[in-house]
Amino acid sequence: MRLFSVLLLAATLAAQVPYSRLRDAAKEPGSWLTYNGTYFSQHYSALDQVNRANVSKLGLQWVFQARSLEKFETTPLVADGVMYLTEPPNNVIAVDPATGRPFWMYEHTLPEVTYPCCGKVNRGVAILGNSIYHATHDAKVVALDARTGRKQWETTVANYQEGYALTHAPLAVKDKIIIGPAGGELGIRGFVLALDARTGKEVWRFKVIPEPGEKGNDSWGGDSWKHGGGSIWLTGSYDPELNLTYWGTGNPGPDWNPAVRPGDNLYTDCVVALDADTGELKWHFQFTPHDEWDWDAVQVPVLADLEWAGKPRKVMLWGNRNGFFYVLDRATGEFLLGKPFVKQTWARGLDAQGRPEKIPGMGPSRQGTKVWPGVQGGTNWYAPSFSPLTKLFYLTAWEDYHGTYFTWDQEYEPGKWYVGGGVKAPVPPTRREPIVTRGTEDGYATIRALDPRTGERVWEYPMADMSESGLLTTAGGVLFSGSREGWFFALDAASGKLLWRIYLGGQVIASPITYLVNGKQQISIAAGSSLFTFAVLE
Amino acid sequence: MLRQIAPVVLFFAPVVAAQESSAILSNPFNTPADRIEGARLFRSQCANCHAEDGRGTSAGPDLSSGAFKRASSDEGLFQIVAKGLPGTVMPGFSLSGREIWQVLAFIRSLSISRARETVTGDASRGAALFRTHGCGGCHDGLLGPALGESVRRKPLFELRRSITDPQVEVESRWWRLRAATHDGAALSGRRLNEDTHSVQYADPSGRLRTVSKADLTQYEIVRKSPMPPFDLTDGELDDLLAYLVSGAP
């Protein structure tokens, strides 16, 4: 009997985080089990110990210092008393969330040079069963033993020398690990790939750029599909009831020479809804057909169940880089609403199907074309949030931000940049230095709360500089975010009023998470080169 | 057999070394044809951040001045292009060694062509003008830009314009602050830095201060330069420019 108990215990331990826990993660707010918190990716927590009344008493608990100067984009997981985070370029560290002390570390051996476009970044890991899954710049997925960090398997999913790099946290669904490659500036062809979680073997692959004979290939003139881009660099979402997994796809290539790729360029700048068992495309919605500005639809697909025209509806909320906010039916892909959430000068509006009515002459040109928004978009990859409490959708927006877009001819050469132009923007794409003296006419970041039923703004919290910080809302009525300036702060989610702030000094380019440690709520955020953890001081 | 192979190896050795190692300290691919190929590669691989003319954008610095922040030698620049710069958006590039040298040959040629801009004035007469007009009173790096290396690297037309019409382009780091606090105190000085909640500035005495925006009732950024336009003849302007680019001030 005792032996049986021990075996039972061992079996329980072996299935540390089964699929059922991921599926029901919203009911387990003491953990943070997926990159986006739950499969619905709302970046919302039901924890309310830290709330509007006491958030001003938050104080530092511990700091984890990364050994890297790269942008620190990690959003950790917390499961069963362990925090799993990544450190650039491709290290995974398990730390004690009570103290910040590391338990183990996995250091991935990279080739001397890899080719992620914009910094040797990594955004996090996935957990399933007893394993941690990590994706690397040399286009590998590695499975690690969650207890030891020992490698269990490693699968190469693409040739990194052709510009493929993996930067996002994988998504674990059922018994699969889903991933896709960055490289939209290097002429890759993107894909969403499911690996068997136990073996690392490929189960299915959805090609973002359809090949000749496949549906959608006729949206590419000539051979332009061959280097069509459509990268995947941010973790998708999943609806267990519909068994659909949703992924935002990257820009078509070459970014700024659209003349060489006539057509809509499917399935770039889309959200694709894939059968999680087979990878079959169930529907797609293209935000920016024939993109001329590099406006990847690489945003977190936020899933919510809303009352829509008097009936409950399964929707998807999407603030796109092109400056429009969208509401889609996530079962069918039907376009329900679209409205600009920042200044934009490239489209008159959206038609009844949600297709933009482009204003002629706003594409890149030899002499340069000034367009709002600029290349980083009205928003970008940083996580938005939906609070079931306030029923508001929140996002980090870049307002009054423009770029001057240039085009030139360029031949594809394997492994090299394939962008066909360039952009001059008044503000840098990411923080370059801690001194900022520009004027607000160059654009500014603002956190905006939108009513998803109308797309109307409810409140905003403007900042002096830009921001690449994700958001977190909680049942305590609080919204947490950070800024390029180096602040980490809490707002009243209902009004936008600033409740608490602390200067961390380095730019926040990640999303906050919250979880319980020994029954007490903590909040963690990466800033600069460190991960900071806060709790209410007694 | 070995004897037959040896010349071939020797023939290729410099190329191979240039491609595979950093042992070569100066650029082995620096002919006019290399610079043309370098220009082509620069446009396709570098210009989206550094601009077609190499003058830089908000994403990547000016590479046309001949002075670089992160490296000065060809070898150092080679390593940056090959491997990227940690902590920045500068990636490593999948270029062959030869291609990297060609890009560097092109980048070096940008500053050479700029250096060909010639000044015709007399630097000693320019020095006298500098003194008699009291330029040094403000150009101390505190109130106005010190006239050192950064000025010498400016294209002549920009330098000339900033003397004849100082208001045309006042860089934001020289903008000034004018503000008033709740208790009625007036603040002024050169704005050094700013964020959502505060402004860092140097007051007229040069003291470094921070003021919280929440404490201000009035806050204005003065973008005009306090420098008056100088009524100089063309000859005097040439003399002053000659002095400024000579490195003397």
Image (tube, coloured by chain):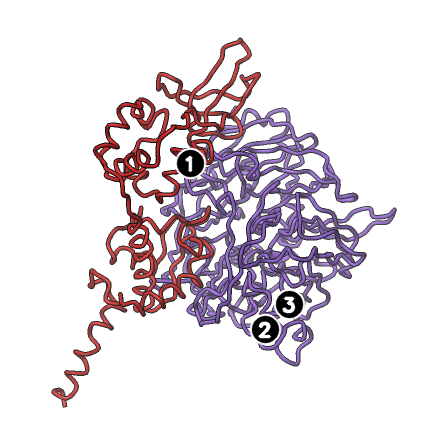
Chain colours: A purple, B red
Q: Residue at x 50, y 52 (%)?
A: A124
Q: Quadrant of the N terminus of chain A?
A: bottom right
Q: Earlier in the sequence, mark 3 or mark 1?
A: 3
Q: Secondary structure at mark 1?
A: loop
In the visual, does A212 lie left or right of B141?
right
The amino acid type of the residue labelled 3 equals: Asn
Q: Nearer the viewer, residue A184 or A109?
A: A184
Q: Amino acid at mark 2?
A: Trp
In the rendered image, residues at marks 3 and 2 fall on the same chain? yes
Q: Position of residue A366 (x, y in %)?
A: 53, 59
Residue A421 x/y as whole percent: 51, 60
Which residue is the site of mark 3?
Answer: A265
Q: Which residue does the numbered mark 2 point to in the structure image? A: A225
Specify the label residue A266 is tagged with.
none
Give the side of residue A367 with respect to residue B10, left or right: right
Query: Chain for mark 3?
Result: A
* Real-space CA distance between mark 3 and mark 1, rounded to the nearest whole angstrom: 39 Å
Q: Subunit of mark 1?
A: A
Q: Which residue is mark 1?
A: A434
* Residue A326, x across and y down, in percent: 72, 51
